[in-house]
Amino acid sequence: MKKTTMIYALVLALGMFFLIPAQAENFRNEKQEIDLPPQFVPCTGESIEVDGFLHIVVSGNIANGIIANLKLHANGQGVRGIGSTGTIYHGNGILNHTIKEPFVGFPLVVHGVEMKINLIGKGQASNYKINVILDLAIISLNQIDFDIVNLICNG
């Protein structure tokens, strides 16, 4: 009797695990200071040191520990850049990316994530549209590391 009750309890628990849909939630919603070394931006012909903040939101779910369905959003706040020639830029940009793939554990590595940035030159300085290509490593739902893979100028 005891063994049968344990088997029923296990079957019920497994059934609930696989049948109950995971709830979406915000894992991260915070403002993070931009802390990057100067980046060479080909269309400007100079390295630019950037400061300001990124507002980062990570939401979604990991359905039953099997499928990662995550939405990443980031946008710049108070972003300013100073070029190696002294040119001052103000920046705004946005990243929206959805990850839906099998989840086998952390870190979850995502290649080729695109963030669009507008560099607005002060006064007579030129304006530039830049696509920043990133590789992300989601170490945990509260920690995302990234590498800048490429900067592509669009004007």
Image: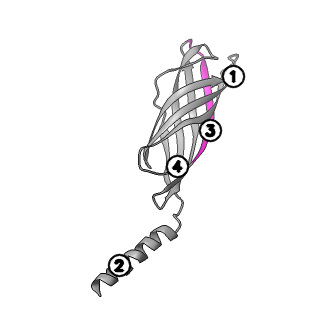
Q: Name the residue under label 3.
A: 94
Q: Which of marks 1 and 3 is in front?
A: 3
Name the residue nearer the viewer: 148 or 119: 148
Mark pair 3, 2: CA separation? 51 Å
Q: Give the mark toward the camera: 1 or 4.
A: 4
- Asked if residue 87 lies in the magenta stretch, the reply is yes
> Which amino acid, by three-letter code, is at mark 3?
Ile
Residue depicted at x 41% and y 50%: 105
* Circle 2 SS class: helix
Main SS class of the magenta portion in the image: strand
Q: Mark 3, residues whose alpha carbon is within 10 Å: few (<14), some, or many (≥20)? A: some
Comes first in the chain, label 1 or label 4: 4
Query: Is 148 included in the stretch rendered in magenta?
Result: no
Along the line of sight, which residue is nearer the eye, 59 or 20? Answer: 20
Q: Report how far apart the C-alphas of labels 2 and 4 lie in the structure.
A: 38 Å
The amino acid type of the residue labelled 2 equals Ile
Q: Do the residues labelled 1 and 4 touch (CB within 8 Å)?
A: no
Q: Percent x, y for residue 30?
A: 49, 46
Which is nearer the N-term, disc 3 or disc 2?
2
Q: Name the residue under label 4.
A: 58
Measured from the top left, where is residue 74 in percent x and y? Answer: 57, 41
Q: In which quarter of the image is the C terminus?
A: top right
Regarding mark 4 in the picture, which secondary structure is present there? strand
- Marks 1/4: CA–CA distance: 30 Å
Q: Which mark is residue 127?
A: 1
Q: Which span of residues is magenta-colored? A: 85-99
Q: Mark 2 or mark 4, which has the lower sequence index?
A: 2
Label 4 packing within 10 angstroms: few (<14), some (14-19), many (20+):
many
User: Which mark, residue 7?
Assistant: 2
